[in-house]
Amino acid sequence: MAAAVRHLPAVTLALLSCFHATVSSRRDVLELGDADFDYLATEHETMLVKFYAPWCGHCKKLAPEFEKAATRLKGTVQLAKVDCTAYSDTCARFGVSGYPTLKIFRYGRDSAPYDGPRTADGIYHYMKKQTGPDSVHLKTEEDLQTFINHYDASIVGVFPGEEGSRQSEFLKAAGLLREQFRFAHTADITLVEKHRVTSECVLLFRPPRLSNKFEDVVVVFTDYLTIGSLRRFIRDHIYGLCPHMTVENRDHLRVRDLLTAYYDLDYHHNPHGSNYWRNRVMKVASKYTERGLMFSVANKRDFLSELEDDFGLGTSDGGGLPFITIRTKLGHKYTMREEFTRDGRSLERFLDDYFAGRLKRFVKSEPVPERNSAAVKVVVAESFDDIVNDPDKDVLIQFYSPSCPHCKKLEPVYTELAHTLYSEPNIVIAKMNAADNDVPLGYDVHGYPTIFLAPVGRKDEPIRYEGGRELKDFMRFLKREARLMSGGSKDEL
């Protein structure tokens, strides 16, 4: 048999290898049903269960990532799945109302919803944090060094003497926050004496790979310890002067105005090269610490589509130099067009212009139409203010995607509405391709089509349309919400 395999063509061997890898990953995902769920789930300390339907598009997209994560987590965390079209009783018992739904179980008990990433890497790292105790008990110097010498930050509580209320509160916090942070505790104060600790406290150790000369590696918390105060301390200090932004933590960082340098960052294979550019960003960042802007670095390969779609930057732009962008918490975007210089002066000029209000915001926009005489007015990001924010017009604006079937179904009704109201001087019926244009602030668009009315006198308070999709539904809405038209009252519409 072995000899026969050796003589198989290379292509056949490759196909067999891929088939074996696929089958193995599928076997690593435990299939559960109504009859065996309780029996098999109780055997596992920590288990991630995917409740799905075979016809669900999001479930199909998740499946290969879930299987890859299951293989990587084999032996530490069990991944399982339940087909809700075949085992509806189990899905109903755990309150599953949409697909896919992911839940974390501990010895068969529904412990918590899974709110982490949906990629193999994301699932792996998120679930690794779910294993073991909420807080690791450190007894020796070796225990401490092993714990803090980690890719992520470490929070260590120091509680000498008998267990008291502060340690109890720390352990409660560790239980609530373990999905986000790593916790450990020790009763031996000699383990942290070199950090000038002489009493109960909490130490935050930033990741060794991010060590730098501009800030302390360790931050000490000595205030009154509650779950809330500890959470705030971690939030305010864990990222430091210039954190490494990833797909997993970007939402946590973007609650503030954020400058990001994107480049070929790889702390696993090239930590020295990764810190080369970060140190240059930090040198500049240290001069602007009181200006309310946060700084970060990121691997541009992890954000290629975002750089292209949100900032208009191609993958070949800039050569090997970092891309520099600013994204404010209000959604305003800026890009540094000047080449990043190693002395940091170009970045300083960019920041000086930003704080002085001299930079033009980057707006993703299709070209403004040369002619726009159709009944439904075409709006692009560059013309949004001129059309939708016209102070003399009530504007009904539909945000759509060219590939959206619901938008295509609505199109004839929406066009009929525009023709019906074409002679009304005070109302504009408009549409904007939200896939290729930035949606302005104040318009919460998460699906297509989404329709708003921007009324006269309240352009900063657009009204979401949530009625039916027939002509009479739109007319009734406009009769209620639109201002006077053709010199008549709203009731005459």
Image (cartoon, rainbow, N blue to C red):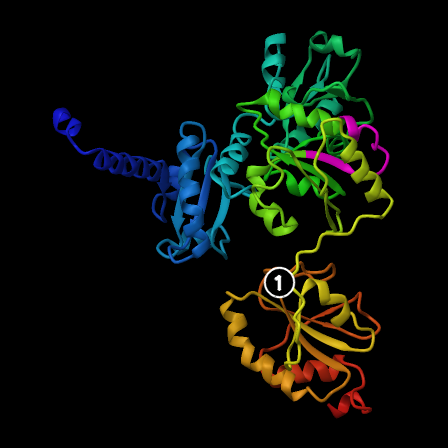
Residue at 75% x, 30% y is: 230
The image shows residue 147 at horizontal and vertical percentages of 60, 18
Q: Amino acid at mark 1?
A: Ala
The image shows residue 117 at horizontal and vertical percentages of 54, 42
Q: Which residues are magenta?
A: 283-296
Which quarter of the figure has residue 139? top right
Numbered disc 1: secondary structure: loop
**Badge 1 is on which residue?**
434
As drawn, is 341 to the left or to the right of 57? Answer: right
Which quarter of the figure has residue 28? top left
Which quarter of the figure has residue 252? top right
Q: Quadrant of the C terminus?
A: bottom right
Residue 452 on the magenta segment: no
Counting every numbered tag in the picture gives: 1
Determine whether 194 is above or below 417 in the image.
Answer: above
Residue 9 is at least partly visible in this image: yes
Residue at 65% x, 64% y is: 367
Q: Quadrant of the N terminus?
A: top left
As drawn, is 484 to the left or to the right of 67? Answer: right
Q: Residues within 10 Å of mark 1 (few under 14, many from 20)?
A: many
Residue 176 is at least partly visible in this image: no
The image shows residue 5 at horizontal and vertical percentages of 16, 29
The residue lying toward the viewer, choosing from 94 and 339, is: 339
Determine whether 27 is above or below 90 in the image.
Answer: above
Residue at 51% x, 44% y is: 118
The image shows residue 240 at horizontal and vertical percentages of 74, 28
Determine whether 3 is above or below 47 in the image.
Answer: above
As drawn, is 206 to the left or to the right of 268? Answer: right
